[in-house]
Amino acid sequence: MLTQLSIKNYALIDDLNVSFGNGFTTITGETGAGKSILLGGLSLVLGKRADLSALKQKDVKCIIEAEFAIANYGLKSFFKENDLDFEPHTILRREILPSGKSRAFVNDSPVTLNILSSLGEQLVDVHSQHQTLQLTENEFQFRVIDALAANAKPLTDYRTELSLYRQYEKELTQLLSFQESASKELDYNSFLLDELEKAPLKPGIQEVLEEEYEQLSNVENIMELLSQGDQLLNEEQVGVLNSISVLQQAGQKLSGYGKQFEALNERVQSVAIELADIAGDLEKLQDVVEANPARLEEVNGQLQLLHDLFKKHQAASVDELLQIKEALSEKVDTSVNIESKIQAKQEELDGQEAKLNTLALQITKNREKVIPQLKSLLEQRLNSLGMPSASFKMDVTPSANFKSNGKDELTFLFSANKGGDYGELKKVASGGELSRIMLTIKAILANYEQLPTLMFDEIDTGVSGEISTKMGDIMQEMGNTMQVFSITHLPQVASKGQSQFKVYKEEIGESTRTGMRKLNDEERITELAEMLGGKDLSDSALAHARQLLHLSS
């Protein structure tokens, strides 16, 4: 519900602050007073695009704020999805800067114009002659039927399953496309995979082979160095082991002369043990190391194969080759088993299609059940609005394709005259007829779904006083359960408002400005009398105004 509206420096408005209550509110004023300006300002804060022409003073920014009570609007998920703080009393603000830039805020958090517009659509539904054309669109017509048919949950379930169906369709298309190209690439991919499977590929193999190659290709030098080391340690007269043995004996004797000599002796003994181990290892290695031309050739061939594969697959390591091997394996496996995968996906798609058809059939049955009810409601209510011969033909027929709202084609035809031909609303209904039909539909919808604040912009244009009274009655009734505004030039409608505001224009010095104020009972009588008989107030006009307001003189 719109509780407050503030407009600064917009068109002919300097600084306007108004508060609104629940129920049905009417807005009146002379032609040219600025009712459209007020609506324009509200549209800006709801996300409509703006330009510099909106500024009254070109060097001062325009600020428009609207406060809404939204506790019962079910918008917490919207605020969460858009990372906004939810407040039961939410303020939308729009700023248009002299530079031409525009900024938007929700509860002081900056938002994009798209977010502001999306939120605005859920807060206020503005109906002008242009918006009434929405009535002629199939999507809106389905919405009306589905509201009466209580199709909200079936449609939610249907759309969930439809999303999964579209996903399966996409996956099947991809598999079929892959099958077409894979059959051409299977032989080549199989050859590449076989080549990689035969190669010595495992983590760290390159380093192992390179180390073995170094040893095999330098075996004579290694054997010579091992022999040299063995001689240095074991030579009879001057070998290191012989010398260390003498040193061991000296250390043992020294250890008896104090603790510092004991420590020295322990170090000597440790070195002797380590050298003895080294000598043993040198001896063993001499027995192990030998020339192996065949193995050298084999290792060289494996290394060359690795380098050829690196070049061929533009890889830098064995790990990358292993990844390529895995990818090729998946491709070959998919190619070999593509038929079974396509069959499985087709079965999955068929099962999903069956689910969708069941849900779509239920939606269709619900629609068929309420169409006679909707037809009867519309024709009855339009009869009281001066359209006694208004008649509708509505029918749903099966569609070959799944649509976003089911599997139906909708025929929604109208005739305003008895015996007249039926046709599409946009072709056979006049603007005034469309307005009355839209008002009637909104009144019906209000009983079946939570509607946002409704703003009717001269929806009563072109109708007689008697009919306008009936239209006012409808909006007044809607105001019992929701917030409704009507910008009107008809006193019969204006009098039905729980409250009435007047938009006026005044000249101050060399400038003109638009203002708006709430009227008290006496001011309403005067305003309605002027609407009935002009500025020269007659007793009869004043009496008629009081009668409209059900006030005694």
Image: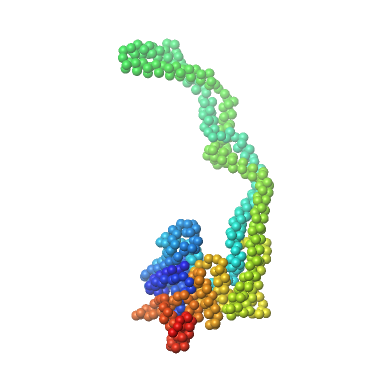
Q: State how the image is colored.
A: rainbow
Q: Quadrant of residue 529?
A: bottom left
Residue 130, percent from left and from top: 54, 73
344 vs 330, nearest the viewer: 344
Q: How many marks overall?
A: 0
Please give left or right for residue 507 compared with residue 496 in the image: left
Observer-nearest of 356 and 206: 356
Q: Quadrant of the C terminus?
A: bottom left
Question: As displayed, is residue 330 above or below residue 371?
Answer: above
Residue 336 shown left or right of residue 62 in the figure? right
Give coordinates of residue 302: x percent, y percent.
58, 32
Is 232 or 538 nearer to us in this picture? Answer: 538
Residue at 67% x, 53% y is 350
Residue depicted at x 54% and y 78%: 470
Note whether residue 136 is visible: yes
Above or below, 373 against 81 in this view is below
- Residue 478 percent coordinates (x, y): 52, 72
State whether residue 248 is above or below residue 112: above
Q: Residue at x 42, y 76 (%)?
A: 518
Q: Is residue 96 visible?
A: no
Quadrant of residue 240 in the image? top left
Viewer-proximal residue among 195 and 553: 553
Going 47% across and 67% down the picture, which residue do you hit?
Answer: 1
Across and down, in percent, residue 513 comes to: 39, 77
